[in-house]
Each structure stands twice: as structure tokens, then as C-alpha cells.
Image: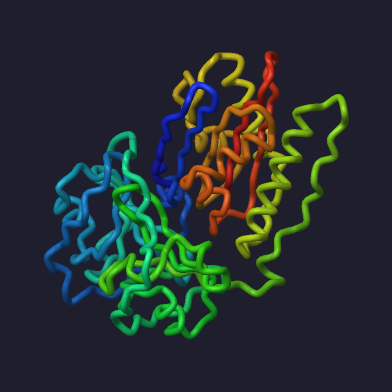
Amino acid sequence: MAHPSTARIAASAARRVTLLRRIPLGLLAALSLVALAPAPAHAHAHAEPNALEPPPVGGLTIGIAGSSDPAAVATAQAFAVETVSVLVPATQTWLVYIPGALANTLTAQALTPDSVVIIRRAGVLTVTALPPRPPTTSPSVSGNGNTFDPPPPGGLVQGLAGTNDPATLVARQSFAVESVSALDVRSQTWLVYLPSAPAFVSALRAGMTEPSSVVTVRRFAPAVARTPTPSPVPTAQPSDPNATAQAVIFASVNEEREAAGLPALTLDATMVAVARAHSRDMIARDFFGHSNPDGEDPFDRMRAAGVSFGYAAENLVSGQSGGGAHATLMASAPHRANILGEHYRRIGIGAIVRPGGGVMVTEVFAD
């Protein structure tokens, strides 16, 4: 698991909201991945690596490698590279190259010049750019769309769109598509198109990509395989305001997802404990942020609790009530994107009522 992409939103004194998002790059998984059979040597092993669009410091960029040498791909960038990652669709694993590391799972034997690579820039992420807005008019469709090799049900595949219209791309596939995503590098936001949802739900629409844009396509999984185990809504006791706020937020999150045509999230008891502990810590030590005074971020805290994940994210908000806190998050596009994240299947909610009133809320998401 690579270091996360993060975005922090300035907040007012009355309501402070902040966000941190992680894109899965398999950094920690490099120590536990099973051995993969080496790919054949590539005729274009010494092709010229591509220089990708520079992301914000600490952020991600995505594009075509241009070379089968991961070290050359890293060196070709105009910024310090922390990781270079490639998705293996057949196994749904991420191979990672870390400059200067003694051992890497992404090697010249596993990389081709036409591979899609995700590169993380070194540093701590601070994003100031807002996500792009969908066009107000319907642009002309260009390109017929490329056909991708089918990933496993529920899995991902990446490649060049071949069109500026996600609906056209979906129609070209030989498998049912759940979503099409494109990374907006400047805002570090994944724009998502949902074929089964009303048009206004999708942040990715025609004209927001080019035929040469890299997209990530998730294959639809059969309902029996993708429906999470029902999780009872916590029953709040009158004397437990924390449980009441948690129940309100949990129900509200799944109502939003149902309205967007997304599967409900399962309330994970371990993740709830992680979220509650961070909310209590912020109140006790009087700080507000993803990293605590000891330097631990949400992904450190989840790993320490034994939570496994490929995709993960955290929302923080300080509000007057559980319902008010949820409304504040939904009014922020990046936080709303986490709540409606297509990759997430589990949630932990830590809603702690402050001694002087109001509620401190931590939401952690994982696939």
C-alpha cells in the first residue's frame, strides 16, 4: 500500500472539515505478494519512457509507461518519484517499484511500454485545485472507444479510453460495466461515471476526457457476489448520545448510496473502534487532523488494528449533531466522493459528543 493521496479542505471555526484519500498502490503488499510468473522479454524494452503530467507534491499521476524499465520511467519524470505502480487485471494485484529499494515487485519483466502506470510524487499532499465541473452543454462525441480485456467480476482494468464519452466506452465492452473512473491530476479527484445511475450523479461525463486519456473500468459483479452481509443499524439507547449520532450517520450514508445506485456499506466493528479512538483522541488532545501528534495517519491506525484494505479513506468533521455533520460532508464534493466511493464496502464511524456540546465525527472507509 503506497502512501495515500490526501486533500485537505479549509474550514470555518464553526465547522471544520478535512479529508484524506488513499489510492491503492500496493506498497506494503510488496512484502507479501505471492510470486508472479515472469512475463516474456519485450521487444521494446528500451523504448523511451513517458514524462507524465506532474501532480501536486505527494499526489498521483497516471499514464502510459513508454518503457519496460521502471527505473527509467521514474527517472523520466520532472519530479521526485516515490512509487511507480501497475495493476495486474488477472490477479487484481498491484506491482510496485520504489526507487532505491532493495526489492521491488514491479520489474522490467513485468512492465511493458504500453502499461498503464500510476506514479506517486514524493512529499506530503496539499491540494488547492477544485475538481472540474461537468460541461453545461452536451459536447460532440469523438472516438469509438477501446475494448478492454475483461477483468474478474468486480475487478478493475485500465487503458486508453479511445473516446471522450464514457457511455460510448461502456458500450464497447464485452462485459457489464459498473463504473468508469478518470483521475483529475490537479485536484487529485477520481471522476466517476456510473452507467446505471441518472446522469446528474456522475462526475465524469462526455467531454471531460480525451480519447488519449487513461481510464479505470470496474466490471460489474453479480448481485449475489457483491451484496454485502446485512449489518444491523445500531440500536441507540436514550443514555448513549454517541450511539445515536453514529446510527443517524450510518443510516444517512447508506441512504445516499442507495439513491446513487451504489451498494450499502457494512458497519465494521474494528473500523468503528479505530474511528472512535481517533475522535476521542482529537477531543482529549485538542487537535483536528488526520495525523495525530504522534505522527500516525489513519492508515497507520487501521493497519495497527488489523484492518486489511486496498482502497481506504477518511472523513473528519466537527458538527452540532450527527445529521448536521453528515450534511456538512455531503456539501463538500471530495467528502461526498468518499461517501459515494465505488470501491468501498465497509465503514467505521466514530461519533463522540463533546462535553460542551456538538459532535466530533471520524469516518473511515475500506474495500
**Residue 106 location in percent, x, y?**
32, 58
* In the rendered image, the vertical position of residue 291 relative to residue 63, given as above or below: above
Asked whether residue 84 appears in the rendered view, the answer is no
Residue in view at x 81 percent, y 41 percent: 234
Which quadrant of the structure image shows residue 182? bottom left
**Residue 172 location in percent, x, y?**
42, 84
**Residue 178 location in percent, x, y?**
54, 71
Side (left or right) of 293 relative to 65: right
* In the rendered image, the vertical position of residue 292 relative to residue 19, given as above or below: above
Residue in view at x 50 percent, y 51 percent: 337
* In the rendered image, the vertical position of residue 7 relative to residue 257, given as above or below: above
* In the rendered image, the vertical position of residue 366 relative to residue 161, given as above or below: above
Question: Furthest-front residue in view?
Answer: 137
- The colour style of the image is rainbow
Side (left or right) of 49 relative to 228: left
**Residue 144 location in percent, x, y?**
33, 84
